Image (tube, grey):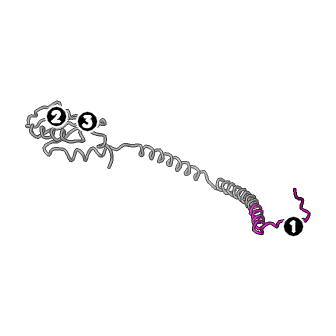
Amino acid sequence: MAIDIIPKPPEEEPIWLNILFYISIGFLISVILIYFLLGHLQRNSEEILEGIEISLQVAQTSEERELENSVLQYKRKIDDFAIIFSQHKTNSGVFPFFEEITHPEIQFSSFQLAKPSVTLSGTAENFVALAQQLSIFQKNPKVSTVNLSQISSGEDGNVGFIFTLTLLPEIFEFK
């Protein structure tokens, strides 16, 4: 083992390391000061807000309180209606569908909807028109089943009937 008799000068640290150290210390001190400053500002803001709320409550008359309560009740009712309306399923897609596929000599007098089944009762000018309407329903891809019942002949030559149709769910969707 060699023993060094000549002392070596200590190695100097690079200058950038010293600068970085002092910048880090300055940043740490500024973060701590900002933390306490923001806490102080928050407490002051809360105190000011409480003072404003108290002054508003004192300044309100009983009439204003009643008016505010009634407005809040209406707001709750509107919010409840909005929930109901958003969950409402519309059947308006059914009517345009029947407008397109109804024979011109057919008149429907009753319409009962129990998804996906529709019961239609009405009159036709003759048996040919009724048969054509039955064929239109059977050929339509949106109608899965067709049932024709209670056929009756009227005194004026009209034919009474009841159709029971089972429709595909896509008809009930609003477009």
Q: Which three-letter amino acid code belongs to the residue tagged 3?
A: Thr
Q: Is residue 65 left or right of 22 when viewed as pictured? A: left
Q: Which residue is mark 3?
A: 166
Element at label 1:
loop
The residue that label 2 is drawn on is: 161
Q: Closer to the camera, 147 or 85? A: 147
> Would you call the spot at circle 3 few (<14 residues within 10 Å), some (14-19), or many (20 or more)?
some
The disc labelled 1 sits on which kind of residue? Pro
Considering every residue shown, the one lying at the far bottom of the view is 15
Q: Residue at x 32, y 49 (%)?
A: 175
Residue located at (25% from left, 47% from top): 96
> Mark number for residue 9?
1
Q: Residue furthest top?
A: 150
Q: Quadrant of residue 122?
A: top left
In the rendering, at what x and y percent does residue 66 appear?
56, 49
Residue 168 on the magenta segment: no
Determine the CA span between mark 1 and mark 2: 116 Å
Please state the horizontal and vertical placement of residue 157, each as a whole percent of the image: 7, 37
Dot 1 surroundings within 10 Å: few (below 14), some, or many (20 or more)? Answer: few
Q: Nearer the viewer, mark 1 or mark 3?
A: 1
Q: Amino acid at mark 2?
A: Phe
Say which quadrant the N terminus sits in: bottom right
Residue at 29%, 46% in the rendered image: 93
